[in-house]
Amino acid sequence: MRAMASSPDANSRTQAAASRRIQEAKSRVMAVIGTLVDDGRAEWSRTATGEIELRLWTGEVFVLGEIFVTRVE
């Protein structure tokens, strides 16, 4: 079976679409986190290493990375 070749143009469009979806998802997550902070249900701050730390009023602590959110506590 012959493999289908994809054009560089198609790859560029696919990557651009994926990048847009990632940015849209990040914006939505940050908007929800902002609402939690505004409502007093969470606090966020920058750590000494420059990462964003999110502390929920229920006690959970998260580090917000470029791509991932990691639960610390």
Image (cartoon, rainbow, N blue to C red):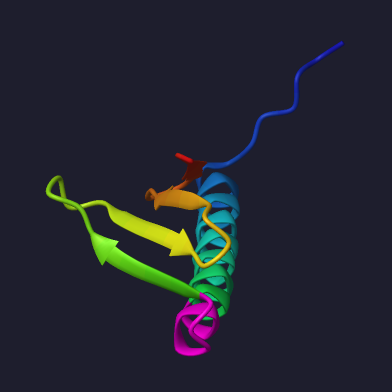
Residue 55 placement, left or right of 48: right
Direction top: furthest residue:
1
**Foreground residue, 14 or 48?**
48
Identity of the residue drawn at 53% across and 50% down: 15
Looking at the picture, how far across and down is residue 71, in whole percent?
51, 42
- All told, the count of numbered labels is 0
Q: Position of residue 14 (x, y in %)?
A: 60, 52
| Magenta span includes 54 | no
* In the image, farthest residue toward the left: 48
Residue 2, position as x, y percentages in the image:
80, 15
In the displayed structure, would residue 7 be above or below residue 29?
above
- State which quarter of the image contains the N terminus: top right
Magenta residues, as a range? 34-41
Q: Left or right? Give the position of 32 relative to 54.
A: right
The reply to whether the magenta stretch includes residue 35 is yes
Residue sticking out furthest to the front = 58
Residue 39 at x, y percent in the picture: 53, 88
Work out which residue is located at the far bottom of the displayed protein and give it.
38
Give the residue drawn at x 20%, y 52%: 47
Residue at image coords 17%, 52%: 50
Front residue of 22 and 6: 22
Q: Which of 46 and 13 is in front in this view?
A: 46
Q: Nearest the camera: 27 or 45?
A: 45
Q: Main secondary structure of the magenta part?
A: helix
Would residue 34 appear left or right of 6 to someone viewing this image? left
